[in-house]
Amino acid sequence: MPSSSKQEPLVTQELIINAARYVFIRKGYSGARMQEIADEAGINKALLFYYFRSKENLFHAIFIGVLEQIQKEIISILNSEMDLFDKLRFFFNFYIGILQKNSFVPAFLIHEVNQNAQILVDDFKKAGFTMPVHFIKQINRGVKQGRIKAVDPVQLLLNMLSLAIYPIMAEPLIKGVLNIDDDSYNEIIEKRKTELADWVIDSIKK
Amino acid sequence: MPSSSKQEPLVTQELIINAARYVFIRKGYSGARMQEIADEAGINKALLFYYFRSKENLFHAIFIGVLEQIQKEIISILNSEMDLFDKLRFFFNFYIGILQKNSFVPAFLIHEVNQNAQILVDDFKKAGFTMPVHFIKQINRGVKQGRIKAVDPVQLLLNMLSLAIYPIMAEPLIKGVLNIDDDSYNEIIEKRKTELADWVIDSIKK
DNA sequence: TGTATATTTAACCAATTGGTTAAACCAAAT
DNA sequence: ATTTGGTTTAACCAATTGGTTAAATATACA
């Protein structure tokens, strides 16, 4: 943290981005306070506005960064060259692991997109977003070759995303509704890393 | 709408509650504006504050109302006396239908609980919330009787909720990512009402 | 007709908050 | 020793926003 002294601009910029990400992801755009971001970064408001001209400006940087992370860590897995069943196992295990460290990201994304769907169309290209085309083709190929049952690849993808994402993004809600304590819930999630793949594979294999 | 005249207080109260629900569910607590709620209700701010002393006050009324709706419409289905497979079919068909008309509710709930987990513990009792105990027992019974495979009822419940809720709450996001238009997406959701039940039943039946 | 009550109008207040500014400060490089 | 640039301090501004108030209006009802 810069303590009333001189620092590398890039270091400070990263401090700000990390802090802003932390706050925006939890509070959302309207709930986040620039003062809180400055505090979290260990700097003052003046310096914060010196690096990012406005709240909107900073928010966009964070938002695009989140999209880039998703593109890099998830879509690329789906489009990788890998045996289908291996890929499914890897997907659930790896993706749920990432989600555990980014449990606020899905709700954040959905909340912001819900309020401004246009934010996507504009920012997606900046983040270099692409569809999981390869994965969809891979499924269709498997169906044609008779390796797996006749499944709609989009429905399968929706199911995979739902099963992986929802129980993590809704953790506090579910824990409250089902009255489950922290340790038990972690166990449940940990099991899903392998069981979900087993379940999905079992349901599509011939 | 009350047009500069006298009205039944209950009518006005309902106008306010409907408007507040509409705005809160979409914008969240921090994003909602009392002026916007007043406009949406077709009244003015003074009257709004005359009926509900504060934003927090109004928010709690809405929040508890949402919880009550969930309790009434979903938990009660899970706990109803019904053959397991019939119940699963009914659940997906009925619940997805409700979600289509309340697509902002899940993200709203998660967003608010994420920021104040205590809100649950306090408001859940007011809403008369109960766990789907009967459903869990029903699954365990089915397993013991050898009618279905050995599944963890909590995992099954998580899967059911995930598969039903996520594709609807994340609709704008998914449409953006996968580049799907409105009509196609509606078709996809419509199919899920029956296909999800088929899929789940097929995966647990012996 | 008069009274009680719901509603509007419109002005107002105080706190919050995004954003600015200018001067002072501090460390590192020259 | 001086300059340079990152950083702090602290005051400040304007807009937004939750919330209040008092008087005027309109309607139902007795």
Image: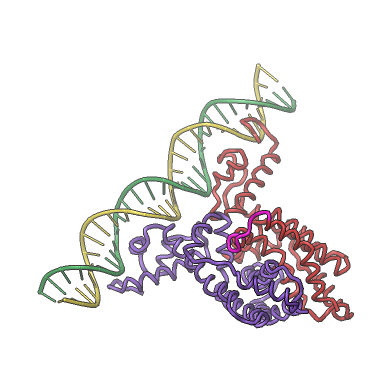
Chain colours: A red, B purple, C green, D yellow
Q: Is residue D11 left or right of residue A86?
A: left
The residue at 55%/67% (across/down) is B130
The residue at 74%/56% (across/down) is A98
Do we see residue B26 in this rendering?
Answer: yes
B63 or A177: nearer the eye? A177
B32 or B13: nearer the eye? B13
Q: Give the x, y percent position of residue B52.
A: 37, 61
Quadrant position of residue A48:
top right
A167 or A26: nearer the eye? A167
Q: Is residue B119 left or right of residue A155?
A: left
Q: Is residue A176 magenta?
A: yes
The residue at 73%/77% (across/down) is B145
The residue at 86%/66% (across/down) is A86
Q: Give the x, y percent position of residue B164.
A: 65, 73
Q: Which residues are magenta?
A: A175-183
Q: Is residue B54 magenta?
A: no
